[in-house]
Image: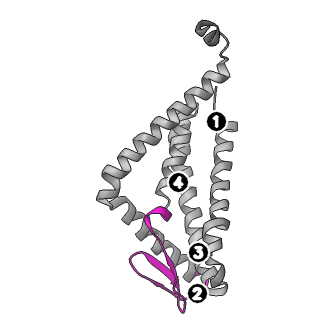
């Protein structure tokens, strides 16, 4: 019975099972690495937050708004602004994106080029999200929570999903 079960497994079934196991393994590694080192050290989170605050302020200033910024907050003068916490700095999205590209088939050289470009795109999207949230706070403050939880989250994840699809269609080999 077991012999016939393994005989009937297709190469696609093996690929899916391998992908799931690798994904689960990377998730465990990320969880252990983040919780036991990166979170406690805080350097990466703080670095990303400081850069997001600065970049968001610069973009808002370029758009003609007068801004304020604190260690982990940025906004348009006259508003309470946007607080950027560790869950919103994009680090988990970086790990998710990198993990997917790493475990999906493809040439190493393509991965070494695609991952940094993808991370840069995700970071720029996060800056655009924060700019959008700061503008929402100014004009539609009552909708901040909805836009933060749903609108911008859906947009960011959809664009990351499109980058994954692009990877699979353009660079992946089975």
Query: Residue 56: x, y in percent?
Result: 52, 74
Residue placed most toward the observer, 139 or 21: 21
Looking at the rendered image, the disc whose residue lies closer to the viewer, 2 or 4, is 4
| Quadrant, the N terminus | top right
The circle drawn on residue 65 is 2
Question: Going 50% across and 59% down the picture, which residue do you hit?
Answer: 90
Question: Which residue is labeled 3 in the image?
Answer: 131
Question: Which residue is labeled 1 in the image?
Answer: 171
Looking at this rendering, what residue extends furthest in the front direction? Answer: 1
Query: Residue 113: x, y in percent?
Result: 53, 43
Dot 2: few (<14), some (14–19), or many (≥20) neighbours within 10 Å?
A: some
**Mark earlier in primary sequence (3, 2):** 2
> Label 1 vs label 4: CA separation?
21 Å
**Mark earlier in primary sequence (3, 1):** 3
Query: Looking at the image, do the residues carrying marks 1 and 4 touch, with CB atoms under 8 Å apart?
Result: no
**Mark earlier in primary sequence (1, 2):** 2
**Mark earlier in primary sequence (1, 4):** 4
Question: Going 68% across and 43% down the picture, which residue do you hit?
Answer: 165
Residue placed most toward the observer, 1 or 83: 1
Residue placed most toward the observer, 24 or 61: 24
Looking at the rendered image, the disc whose residue lies closer to the viewer, 3 or 2, is 3
Question: Which residue is labeled 4 in the image?
Answer: 93
| SS under mark 2 | loop
| Residue 149 counted in the magenta span | no
């Amino acid at each position: 019975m077991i012999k016939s079960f393994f005989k009937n497994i297709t190469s696609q079934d093996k690929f899916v099972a391998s992908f799931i196991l690798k994904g689960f393994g990377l998730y465990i590694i990320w969880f252990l690495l983040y919780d036991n080192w990166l979170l406690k050290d805080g350097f990466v989170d703080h670095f990303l937050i400081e850069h997001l605050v600065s970049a968001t302020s610069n973009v808002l200033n370029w758009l003609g708004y007068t801004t304020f910024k604190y260690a982990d907050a940025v906004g348009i003068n006259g508003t309470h602004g946007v607080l950027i916490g560790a869950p919103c700095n994009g680090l988990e999205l970086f790990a998710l994106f990198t993990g997917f590209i790493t475990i999906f088939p493809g040439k190493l050289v393509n991965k070494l080029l695609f991952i940094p470009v993808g991370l840069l795109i995700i970071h720029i999207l996060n800056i655009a999200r924060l700019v959008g949230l700061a503008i929402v706070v100014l004009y539609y403050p009552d909708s901040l929570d909805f836009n933060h939880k749903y609108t911008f989250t859906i947009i960011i994840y959809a664009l990351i999903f499109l980058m994954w699809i692009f990877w699979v269609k353009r660079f992946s080999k089975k």
